[in-house]
Image (cartoon, grey):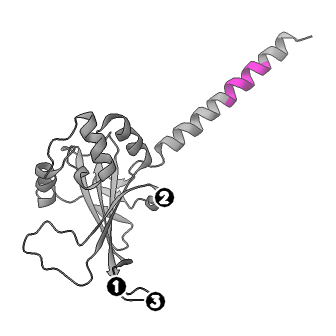
């Protein structure tokens, strides 16, 4: 026979377990959000190589006078998983989107490789983050170099802001270089520019 006390204890246990599960879900949901040391100083994203890979470019340059090189750099772009899932649904980036640009060198002839290029050492790490509570323009850039644990926000007067504003296909991001997301943005009608 169930007593009131037993029923009450069962209810409390269910409430506690449900609350613990909710807290764990909330913790997981926030694990890929940007982290800051201060208002304008971001901590280097950890585990970004386990995030969603969007695309890689080889020898890309926005400067028409840039000379070709025998060993062009690779650009690898990763995005935090929660932002990626939101983009799949809406075709836009939510608040707390964190895009990581990993720049790596390239090698041509090594081991058994006779043609083409493969990625080598890390050259630098850059972050493009959307955080409406932290930045007046919603988006900000950070340069971590090769190994810095934290970076100060790049000033809004820097050319990266105007370039992304003018040429970003979705918001201030170069979705035109991420083929699978570009198709989603076109279907959702969120593309503002396609050059």
- Is residue 131 on the magenta stretch? no
Kindly report which numbered mark, 2 or 3, lies closer to the viewer in this rendering: 3
Left/right of residue 31 with respect to residue 21 in the rendered view: left
Q: Is residue 122 depicted above or below 24 in this figure?
A: below
Quick one: label 2, few (<14), some, or many (20+) residues within 10 Å?
few
Q: CA distance from mark 1 to mark 3?
A: 10 Å
**Residue 78 visible in this rendered orientation of the protein:** yes
| Residue 65 badge | none
- Is residue 14 on the magenta stretch? yes
User: Quarter holding the N terminus?
Assistant: top right
Q: Position of residue 10 (x, y in %)?
A: 78, 21
Taking the spot 17% from the left edge, 69% from the top edge, the residue there is: 61
User: Observer-nearest residue: 2 or 59?
Assistant: 59
Q: Find numbered disc 3 in the image and state the secondary structure of the residue it sits on.
A: loop
Taking the spot 57% from the left edge, 36% from the top edge, the residue there is: 23
Q: Position of residue 124 (x, y in %)?
A: 31, 72
Q: Earlier in the sequence, mark 2 or mark 3?
A: 2
Where does label 2 land, which residue?
Answer: 50
Where does label 1 land, which residue?
Answer: 108
| Residue 111 badge | 3
Taking the spot 16% from the left edge, 59% from the top edge, the residue there is: 160
Q: Which residues are magenta?
A: 9-17
Q: Earlier in the sequence, mark 2 or mark 1?
A: 2
Residue positioned most to the right: 1
């Amino acid at each position: 026979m169930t007593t009131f006390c037993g029923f009450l204890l069962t209810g409390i246990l269910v409430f506690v377990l449900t609350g613990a599960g909710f807290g764990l879900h909330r913790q997981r949901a926030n694990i890929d959000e940007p982290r800051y040391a201060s208002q304008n100083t971001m901590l280097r994203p950890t585990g970004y190589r386990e995030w969603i890979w969007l695309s890689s470019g080889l020898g890309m340059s926005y400067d028409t006078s840039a000379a070709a090189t025998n060993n062009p750099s690779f650009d690898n772009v990763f995005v935090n998983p929660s932002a990626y899932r939101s983009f799949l649904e809406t075709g836009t980036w939510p608040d707390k989107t964190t895009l990581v640009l990993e720049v790596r060198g390239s090698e041509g002839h090594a081991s058994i490789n006779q043609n083409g290029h493969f990625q080598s050492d890390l050259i630098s790490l850059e972050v493009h983050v959307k955080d409406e509570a932290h930045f007046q323009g919603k988006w900000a850039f950070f340069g971590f170099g090769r190994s810095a644990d934290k970076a100060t926000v790049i000033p809004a007067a820097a050319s990266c802001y105007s370039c992304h504003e003018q040429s970003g296909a979705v918001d201030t991001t170069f979705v035109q270089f991420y083929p699978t997301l570009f198709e989603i943005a076109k279907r959702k009608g969120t593309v503002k520019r396609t050059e």
